[in-house]
């Protein structure tokens, strides 16, 4: 068998990638699906479209590789994490659209839980914050607002799942209703300390336990692709949330190893070992993966605006024609001439968690140009990542020796050099940037012996470039002090 087939089900598209034994992407297919915005702050997906696009790209990737079912050693699934679905167990028919992780409709529910004094209990048990981001309040909303859903759920007729659960259900013809601990740990319903669904938290949200999937490990053979589907008969052998998958794809396998994904926002995850470390600095504690009976944990920090800041310079200010034009423009000046850009266009994420913060420019003079603004935007992204990394080291008590990076903006060499300068440590970019799909493939391949061990994986890892710090630590500290002054002024603006 030549390949592991990775299904990467993201927020805007479904992808399928075939990886060979050297971890190389041999065939890729991708298809976007519709985003639905029924009300301000609401974001939905059609579950049937998630499935149809995913099964379509499976077939397309196999065709491009000239491969059949017999060439696929295993199938791995990576997914957008907190997106919430509810469907009929008997028919597989969704009761409505999926509520996407970005959706904010349950903000009042989170406020009510805080007013009941439950925030400490949720944080202590789940490692999360009471925020509409997570799946539990979304599920409670579906049960409350879908006609007939609650009594049907209490009778055991409905099934809840995040996207990994939905795809596995469909891939197996309705035979499996499962998730992994990493996805479960993003629901507000999973107890990090017991490794199981928590009855007290279910009660607080009025969720009947019968709707929940069985929690299996992140890397094992759960079942096989149903007859009549692409790759029929292939073992389904990994379920993993997209950011956890990228952490595995970057081979962050030991405490202190960390990766950052530069996308619309940033997701920084640090491996913390085999016991959960609760954050004192407003970070999230999450399961990274469970494999061979051992659970690995991570700290996570989310930056809301990263690539989105570059998009704003392009589309809002018309500063450049393409996002790629930012790098040469920013590189045309040696520094920002004292300009700081706080890209809090939708508030500030970790470690600040200030939804009232707003984007701000500081230090403008008549000498400031478009190039200084472009460079300040790149620095603004890098400063936010540095904030999260310092908070992680403080929480975990473990130094991070280097930062491994991926995502679209990691192609920007100047951004990564600025990042290395501010962190005062190396920033490492791999040759294979499809780390989310690669991580799901690694976990599936390990489960079936396609790769023998994590050491086997490390032999195939290839570095594209390592960015070393080029400025003195005193200069980096001076820049960070200026950034912190700017952030404090941007907070609580709205």
Image: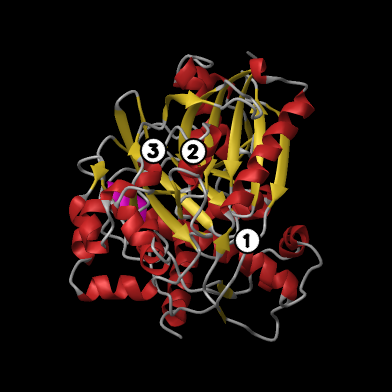
Which region is colored magenta?
A: 391-396
In depth, the one of 130 and 424 nearer the eye is 130
| Residue 426 visible somewhere in the drawing | no
Looking at the image, tell me whether mark 1 or mark 3 is earlier in sequence order: 3
Does residue 252 sit above or below 368 in this rendering? above
CA gap between label 1 and label 2 equals 34 Å
* 392 in magenta: yes
Q: Which residue is mark 3?
A: 180
Q: Picture coordinates of residue 12 (x, y %)? A: 63, 54
Image quarter where the N terminus lies is: top right
Residue 191 position (above or below residue 353): above
User: Which circle's residue, 1 or 2, is located before the other in the chain?
Assistant: 2
Q: State the SS at label 2.
A: helix
Q: Residue at x 38, y 73 (%)?
A: 107
Sequence-first tag of 3 and 2: 2
Examine the image and state in which quarter residue 326 appears: bottom right
Q: Is residue 133 left or right of residue 156?
A: right
Residue hosting label 1: 307
- Dot 1 lies on which element? helix
């Amino acid at each position: 068998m030549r390949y592991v087939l990775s299904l990467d089900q993201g927020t805007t598209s479904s992808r399928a990638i075939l990886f060979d034994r050297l971890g190389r992407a041999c065939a890729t297919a991708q298809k976007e699906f519709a985003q639905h915005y029924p009300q301000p702050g609401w974001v939905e997906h059609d579950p049937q479209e998630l499935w149809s696009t995913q099964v379509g790209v499976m077939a397309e990737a196999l065709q491009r590789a000239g491969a059949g079912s017999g060439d696929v050693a295993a199938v791995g699934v990576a997914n957008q994490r907190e997106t919430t679905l509810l469907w009929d167990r008997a028919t597989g028919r969704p009761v409505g659209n999926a509520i996407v992780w970005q959706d904010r409709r349950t903000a009042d529910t989170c406020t009510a839980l805080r007013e009941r004094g439950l925030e400490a209990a949720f944080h202590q048990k789940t490692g999360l914050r009471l925020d509409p981001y997570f799946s539990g309040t979304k599920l409670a909303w579906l049960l409350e607002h879908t006609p007939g859903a609650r009594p049907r759920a209490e009778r055991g007729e409905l099934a809840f799942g995040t996207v990994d659960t939905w795809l596995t259900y469909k891939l197996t013809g309705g035979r499996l209703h499962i998730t992994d601990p990493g996805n479960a740990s993003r629901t507000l319903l999973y107890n990090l300390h017991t490794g199981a669904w928590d009855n007290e938290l279910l009660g607080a949200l009025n969720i009947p336990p019968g709707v929940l999937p069985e929690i299996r490990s992140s890397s094992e053979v759960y079942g096989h692709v149903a007859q009549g589907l692409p790759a029929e008969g292939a073992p389904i052998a990994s379920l993993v949330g997209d950011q956890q998958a990228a952490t595995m794809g970057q081979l962050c396998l030991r405490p202190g190893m960390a990766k950052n994904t530069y996308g619309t926002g940033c997701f920084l995850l640090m491996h913390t070992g085999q016991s959960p470390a609760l954050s004192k600095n407003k970070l999230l504690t999450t399961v990274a993966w469970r494999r061979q009976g051992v659970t690995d944990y991570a700290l996570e920090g989310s930056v809301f605006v990263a690539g989105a800041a570059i998009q704003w310079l392009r589309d809002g200010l018309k500063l450049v024609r393409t996002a790629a034009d930012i790098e040469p423009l920013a590189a045309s000046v040696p520094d920002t001439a004292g300009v700081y850009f706080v890209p809090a266009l939708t508030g500030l994420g970790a470690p600040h968690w200030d939804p009232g913060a707003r984007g701000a420019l500081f230090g403008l003079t008549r000498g400031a140009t478009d190039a200084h603004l472009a460079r300040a935007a790149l620095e603004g992204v890098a400063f936010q990542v540095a904030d999260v990394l310092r908070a992680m080291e403080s929480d975990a008590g473990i130094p991070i020796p280097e930062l491994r990076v991926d995502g679209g903006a990691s192609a920007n060499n100047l951004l990564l050099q600025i990042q290395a300068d501010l962190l005062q440590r190396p920033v490492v970019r791999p040759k294979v940037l499809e780390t989310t799909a690669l991580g799901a493939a690694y976990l599936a391949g390990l489960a079936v012996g396609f790769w023998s061990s994590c050491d086997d994986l490390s032999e195939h890892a290839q570095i594209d470039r390592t960015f070393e710090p080029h400025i003195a630590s005193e200069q980096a500290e001076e820049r960070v002090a200026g950034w912190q002054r700017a952030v404090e002024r941007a907070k609580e603006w709205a």
